[in-house]
Amino acid sequence: MQYPFVRYALMVGVLIALCSSLLGVTLVLKRFSFLGDGLSHVAFGGMAIASVLNVTNDMLVVLPVTVLCAVILLRTGQNARIKGDAAIAMISVGALAFGYLIMNIFKTSSNIAGDVCTTLFGSTSILTLTSRDLWISVILSVMVVILFVAFYNRIFAVTFDENFAKATGMKTDVYNLMIAVVIGVIIVISMKLVGSLLITALVIFPALSAMRVFRNFKSVTIFAAVFSVVCSLLGILVSIPTGTPVGATIVAMDIIGFGICCICGRRTSVIG
């Protein structure tokens, strides 16, 4: 803890884990889990564009592109001709291919394979996290938590019975749009730590693990947040002495935690 880069990694890891778990429950219940996966590929394409343009702060490119695609995915998914899963697959594959293509055409580094691997699977070393990354993560994470707490009741209503919520006069499209935008923000701040391919695990595993133990929405959300934070901390602390990739180690902890929750859930149901 005496080294700044260790403190940065721990703080960013906790913030990312907390934010991703909060919205993860909603995405899983709405059967829109692959939205995070699609947006993570879009973020990869945005990062490739920033790299080619030599933008110092790639967040200026990646964040607007990812949020814009989140809105497009939401609108396209409501189109009768293009269903939600097809729209996500289309944009996901297209962004991934486009990003890799322009990185090869406009080479900015002699080690493209290494750059792509780092972007997809996260930084191999926590030394890459800077104080700027920390402050950006703090600001965006605080915004996400405030939005979730402020609109908790409305998010709950949209998650469980969107048609009834719309019938009562609630502007469900606005809250669905807010959820999509917030997920886009979470994806962007997560890329530095776990990479674009592993972000979905941070969104899905805590929610699925909590659902194996609890049935109440509030209990599931709280447990998912605690579960995600603990797994992220363990993953970072294990990766430091072992030298393993941070993102992959965190996901491994999520998988182990999911297995434990499955066992606990089965025992609870048997006892009950």
Image (spheres, grey):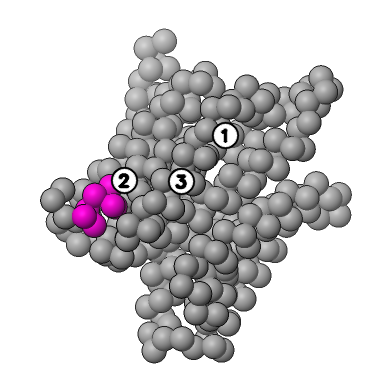
Q: Amino acid at mark 3?
A: Ile
Quarter of the image where one finds residue 45 = bottom right
| Residues rendered magenta in the picture | 4-10
In percent of width and height, residue 249 lies at 30, 53
Question: Is 266 placed above or below 190 here?
Answer: above
State whether residue 224 appears in this view. Answer: yes
Rendered residue at 67%/58% (across/down)? 69
Mark 2 surroundings within 10 Å by alpha-carbon count, few (fewer than 14), some (14 through 19), many (20 or more): some
Rendered residue at 66%/53% (across/down)? 70
Q: Which residue is mark 3?
A: 139
In what element is the residue under mark 2?
helix
Q: Amino acid at mark 1?
A: Leu
In percent of width and height, residue 219 lies at 46, 20
Indicate whether residue 6 is drawn in magenta.
Answer: yes
Indicate whether residue 55 is drawn in magenta.
Answer: no
| Residues at marks 3 and 2, CA–CA distance in whole angstroms | 12 Å
Q: Which residue is mark 2?
A: 11
Report whether 248 appears left or right of 179: left
Report whether 162 appears left or right of 70: right
In what element is the residue under mark 3?
helix
The secondary structure making up most of the magenta span is helix
N-terminal-most mark, 2 or 1: 2
N-terminal-most mark, 3 or 2: 2
| Residues at marks 1 and 3, CA–CA distance in whole angstroms | 13 Å
In percent of width and height, residue 139 lies at 46, 46
Foreground disc of the pair 1, 3: 3
Q: Which mark is residue 147?
A: 1
Mark 3 surroundings within 10 Å by alpha-carbon count, few (fewer than 14), some (14 through 19), many (20 or more): few
